Image (tube, rainbow, N blue to C red):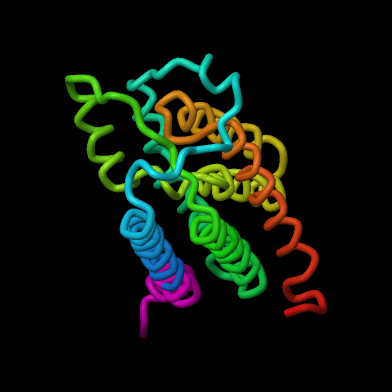
Amino acid sequence: MPDMASSLERNTATPFFAKGLHRILGASFLALMCGGGFVMISLFNVSRVGLHSMPAIQSFGWDKDIPFVPGWVWVYLLYYPFCFLPLLLSEVRDDSETFTKTMTAFSLQFGVSFTFFLLWPLRMVHPMIPLGLNGRILHQLYSFDLGFNSFPSLHLANIVFVSFLFLRLRGRRWALLVFGVAALIAMSTVLIKQHFISDVVMGALLGWGSFIFSERFVWNGLF
């Protein structure tokens, strides 16, 4: 006679892998494609306009008053695991409608941003890199992102969307924590001179707008 307890344990453990694994793989593939597209657009802009021929005209006067604080690069790097937080939510992994809304919103953010990067290749000129560990990390970051893909900020678009997603699915308590981390990441983007304030504002609006779009139109008449 089969062990009923073992059978029950297997049945309760299956749904995460049965329903969620293919969506985790799909989200990872989308992240890989978007990351590759980000690098390719940066290299394309370098090839067509050079490294110094396009000034960052979206800079405002108060951007100069923001100090350069290399140590904030560690907060900046929190962006990468932060973007995968939706996969921790069972609604995103297991529910096709929520997953589709989430992937649509991310795709919209990257699509709009890539269009801006190609049509209006503004550049953020990086400061002198200091010595030490922080400087080495910044050197790798600046080498990966040459400054062209700055307006609007994808950092802000992605983290603002994730924050609103947590507010929608987990309520205010979890949302406050996620929004708090997002605010720190937003501060880091200007403190390590990766973005200007205008980049941050437009990125945040893009993230919020993509959330509203996915909530109202995906699975509700448009898609």
The structure residue drawn at horizontal position 23% and vertical position 26%, both measured from the top left corner, is 135
Foreground pick, 193 / 78: 193
Magenta stretch? 1-25
Q: Residue at x 64, y 47 (%)?
A: 166
Q: Is residue 21 magenta?
A: yes
Frontmost residue, 174 versus 31:
31
User: Which quarter of the rendered picture does the N terminus lie within?
Assistant: bottom left
Quarter of the image for the C terminus: give it.
Answer: bottom right
Residue 11: where, in percent of width, then height? Answer: 46, 74
From the top left corner, tell me how far across and down residue 108 is, in percent. 61, 64
Q: Per the image, is 68 magenta?
A: no
Q: Tag count in the figure? A: 0
Image location of residue 91, percent across then percent down = 61, 62
Residue 223 appearing in the image: yes
The residue lying at 44 percent from left, 37 percent from top is 124
Q: Is residue 91 visible?
A: no
Q: Nearer the viewer, residue 122 or 158?
A: 122
- Please identify the quarter of the rendering in which residue 177 is found: top right
Q: Main secondary structure of the magenta part?
A: helix
Q: Nearer the viewer, residue 181 or 60?
A: 60
- In the rendered image, the residue lying farthest to the bottom is 1
Placement of 84 over or under 214, stated as above or below:
above
**In the displayed structure image, the side of residue 148 where residue 145 appears, left or right:** left
- Which corner quadrant of the image does residue 211 belong to? bottom right
Residue at left offset 49%, top offset 28%: 190
* Image side of residue 167 versus residue 86, left or right: right
Q: Is residue 215 above or below residue 79?
A: below
Q: Is residue 191 above or below residue 150?
A: above
